Amino acid sequence: MLDLMIHDLQILHALDPSPVREVRAVGIDVLSDRVDIADVRIELESGCVANLTASRVSAERVRQLRVFFEDRYHSLDYQEQTVRGFRRVGGDSAGTGAGVSPASAGGPAGRIVPADLEVERGEPLRLELEAFLNRCAGRPVPLVDGEAGRRALETALRVNATISGREE
């Protein structure tokens, strides 16, 4: 699953750099002797939880990453090249206060507002190759440097170990 999930893991670690606390993963082979479909749940030390699904076999071209933080949520759709999000604003853990309706104050948990992220659209492989060539020519450091790649690979190897039953 390394080839299918590595970019998802790079994005996860870019959104939240805290260490991985727990990996839960299942995978099955459907059409080959390798894992063809994997469902992964990663919890970071910060409390962030990410749900990833990777599949080599699917009737539809769907790739999504869902990331849950304490106060926000992002859903990345790779096919549509969009990042939809929501975040919580305001709120009062002690309640809404006298004379303020929960609806107008957003209730004890606050209000939920859209928090979409801007995405540079383009053909992913082309953008990756352009970044590589630019770096070879001495131009700016790419968005994913060697350390970020190493970190994503470390997490991907942990996912593979969990699927194969070699991790705690």
Image: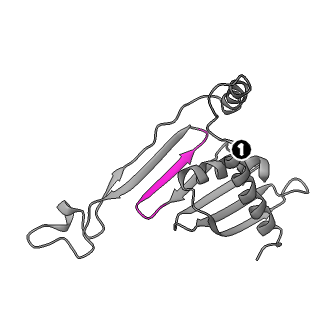
Instruction: Check disc 1: other Cα within 10 Å, few if <14, some if 14-19, many if 20+.
Output: few
What residue is at 59 percent from the left and 67 percent from the top? 43
Q: Is residue 126 magenta?
A: no
Q: Quadrant of the C terminus?
A: bottom right
Q: Position of residue 134 (x, y in %)?
A: 68, 24
* x and y percentages locating residue 63 in the rendered image: 64, 47
* Residue 118 higher or lower than 50, as above or below: above
Q: Residue at x 10, y 73 (%)?
A: 98
| Residue on which disc 1 sits | 146
Give the x, y percent position of residue 38: 73, 59
Q: Give the residue displayed 69% in from the left and 48% down from the top.
A: 147
Does the magenta-highlighted stretch encompass residue 74?
yes
Q: Seen from this angle, which residue lies furthest top?
A: 137
In the picture, the quarter occupied by the N terminus is bottom right
Q: Quadrant of residue 35?
A: bottom right
Depicted 47 relative to depicted 157: above or below: below
Q: Amino acid at mark 1?
A: Gly
The single residue placed furthest to the right in the displayed view is 33
Q: Say whether residue 20 is visible.
A: yes
Image: magenta residue range = 69-79
Q: Is residue 160 left or right of residue 20?
A: right
Q: Quadrant of residue 144?
A: top right
Percent coordinates x, y for residue 54 in the rendering: 71, 53
Look at the numbered disc 1 and give the secondary structure of its residue.
helix
Asked whether the viewer can see residue 58, the reply is no
